[in-house]
Image (cartoon, rainbow, N blue to C red):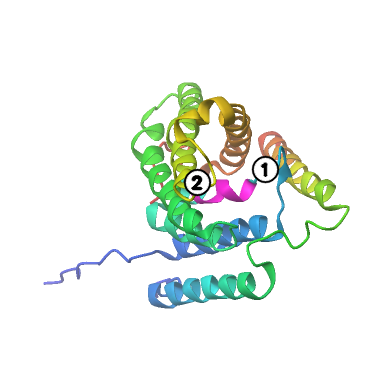
């Protein structure tokens, strides 16, 4: 039996649907701005998320190297 | 006589579709939610803008284009980002495949990768975006950008080098780093 992934056509259609959903979210909610920007915790949250990602990648890399 | 039917290379493989969805969602989410470190308004350090480059490197130019569009949709200036973000995905794909991965020695390749990242940021991406902003009237006199924005793009390129290196080092096989061969 040949192992197959999702068909290209289905995959491309799903990607187009994803982009349409993004467009709808932009038009209905985000509107090109920063919807969370008005929150007082916004800057700290942004720094925490980015710092968290960097720490996660470093931790993963160290884990991978020593196991 | 048995003859193998010629197999047509698909427009996008399952792997590329998955990469486009993952990096596209990340690019959209970072910009859409505004997860970026603010510097001097309106300048920010936005990891979402790195997604088209990473997607191009591991998935090829078409994946880079799709992710660039996903990153451009939530932009405050979609007329700029919907054009230039996919362009980033395209040139990073080819630079990665035909230049960075040509260096067989890993240590040399890392150094070349860092220098290339810095040069592309300062001499391709920064001029492109500043020029587009000047066309729209958001930047007054285009040739002065190295004086007014040079510090920002230098800082951004350092951020870019750190994130790129961390992601590539953690996911070497995804980027074809070990084999020194682009996986697309």
Q: As rendered, which of B19 and B44 lies closer to the eye?
A: B44
Q: Is residue A12 above or below residue B92?
A: below
Instruction: State the count of labels.
Output: 2
Which residue is at the far right?
A: A40
Place of residue B50 in the rendered image (x, y in percent of width and height, measured from the top left): 56, 46
Residue B71 left/right relative to A60: left
Place of residue B55 in the rendered image (x, y in percent of width and height, measured from the top left): 49, 51
Instruction: Label 2, secondary structure: give it.
Output: helix
Please tell me which residue is depicted at 78% across the width and 56% down the height of the picture.
A37
Do pointers 2 and 1 mark residues of a single chain? yes
Residue B56 left/right relative to A38: left
Q: Is residue B85 above or below residue A51?
A: below
Q: As rendered, which of B39 and B67 lies closer to the eye?
A: B39
Q: Is residue B16 above or below residue A4?
A: above
Q: CA distance from mark 2 to mark 1?
A: 15 Å
The magenta stretch is B47-53
Instruction: Label 1, secondary structure: give it.
Output: strand
- Any part of residue B30 in sight: yes
Q: Quadrant of the N terminus of chain B?
A: bottom left
- Any part of residue A6 in sight: no
Q: Nearer the viewer, mark 2 or mark 1?
A: 2
Residue B133 badge: 2
Place of residue B62 in the rendered image (x, y in percent of width and height, measured from the top left): 39, 58
Q: Pinpoint the chain carrying mark 2.
A: B
Give the labeled residue for mark 1. B44
């Amino acid at each position: 039996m040949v192992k197959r992934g999702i068909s290209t056509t289905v995959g491309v259609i799903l990607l187009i649907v994803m982009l349409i959903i993004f467009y709808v979210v932009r038009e209905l909610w985000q509107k090109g701005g920063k919807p969370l920007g008005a929150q007082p915790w916004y800057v700290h949250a942004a720094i925490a998320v980015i710092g968290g990602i960097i720490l996660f990648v470093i931790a993963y890399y160290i884990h991978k190297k020593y196991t | 006589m048995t003859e193998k039917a010629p197999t047509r290379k698909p427009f996008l493989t399952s792997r590329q579709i998955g990469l486009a969805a993952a990096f596209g969602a990340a690019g959209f989410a970072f910009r859409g939610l505004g997860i970026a470190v603010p510097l001097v308004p309106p300048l920010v350090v936005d990891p979402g803008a790195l997604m088209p480059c990473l997607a191009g490197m591991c998935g090829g130019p078409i994946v880079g284009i799709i992710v660039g569009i996903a990153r451009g949709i939530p932009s405050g200036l979609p007329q700029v980002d919907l054009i230039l973000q996919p362009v980033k995905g395209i040139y990073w794909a080819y630079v990665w495949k035909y230049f960075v991965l040509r260096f067989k020695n890993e240590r040399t390749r890392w150094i070349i990768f860092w220098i290339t990242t810095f040069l592309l940021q300062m001499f391709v991406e920064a001029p492109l975006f500043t020029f587009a902003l000047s066309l729209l009237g958001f930047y007054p006199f285009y040739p002065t950008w190295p004086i007014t924005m040079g510090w920002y793009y230098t800082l951004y390129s350092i951020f870019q080098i750190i994130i790129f290196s961390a992601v590539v080092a953690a996911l070497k096989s995804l980027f074809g780093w070990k084999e020194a061969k682009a996986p697309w």
